[in-house]
């Protein structure tokens, strides 16, 4: 499973740990989208800062067709 993660809300003024998590996910600008393979660690990061993100799950086969 591939997760397509989009930064929807600004991390400015948030808990420093959450700001660092957003940066670790590879998100630096609003409405920026990144794709990551789903792992337990990644799912934990997404759950921690989920209030700032929009997440879409893409099956493995579909993700390769779009790229």
Image: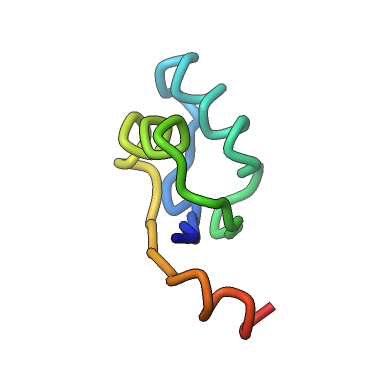
Residue 8: image x %, image y %? 43, 53
Residue 29: image x %, image y %? 63, 48
The image quadrant that residue 64 belongs to is bottom right
The image quadrant that residue 52 belongs to is top left
Asked which colour scheme the image uses, the reply is rainbow
Of 33 and 43, nearer the camera is 43
Q: Residue furthest front?
A: 61
Question: In screen coordinates, is 39 left or right of 67?
Answer: left
**Picture residue at 60% right of the left edge, 56% below the top:** 34
Of 39 and 49, nearer the camera is 39
**Picture residue at 44% right of the left edge, 60% below the top:** 1
Question: In screen coordinates, is 10 left or right of 66?
Answer: left
Residue 4: image x %, image y %? 49, 61
Q: In the rendered view, would you say 35 is above or below 18? A: below
Of 9 and 22, nearer the camera is 22
Q: In the rendered view, would you say 21 is above or below 63? A: above
Q: Residue furthest right?
A: 67
Q: Residue furthest top?
A: 16
Count the marks.
0
For the C terminus, give its image quadrant.
bottom right
Residue 62: image x %, image y %? 52, 80
**Picture residue at 48% right of the left edge, 55% below the top:** 5
Question: In screen coordinates, is 4 left or right of 28?
Answer: left
**Picture residue at 38% right of the left edge, 56% below the top:** 54
Q: In the rendered view, would you say 15 is above or below 36? A: above
Q: In the rendered view, would you say 55 is above or below 46? A: below
């Amino acid at each position: 499973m591939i997760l397509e993660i989009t930064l929807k809300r600004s991390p400015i003024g948030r808990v420093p740990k959450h700001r660092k998590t957003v940066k670790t996910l590879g998100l630096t600008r609003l409405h920026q989208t990144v794709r990551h393979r789903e792992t337990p660690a990644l799912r934990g990061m997404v759950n921690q800062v989920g209030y700032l993100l929009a997440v879409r799950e893409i099956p493995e086969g579909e993700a390769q067709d779009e790229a």
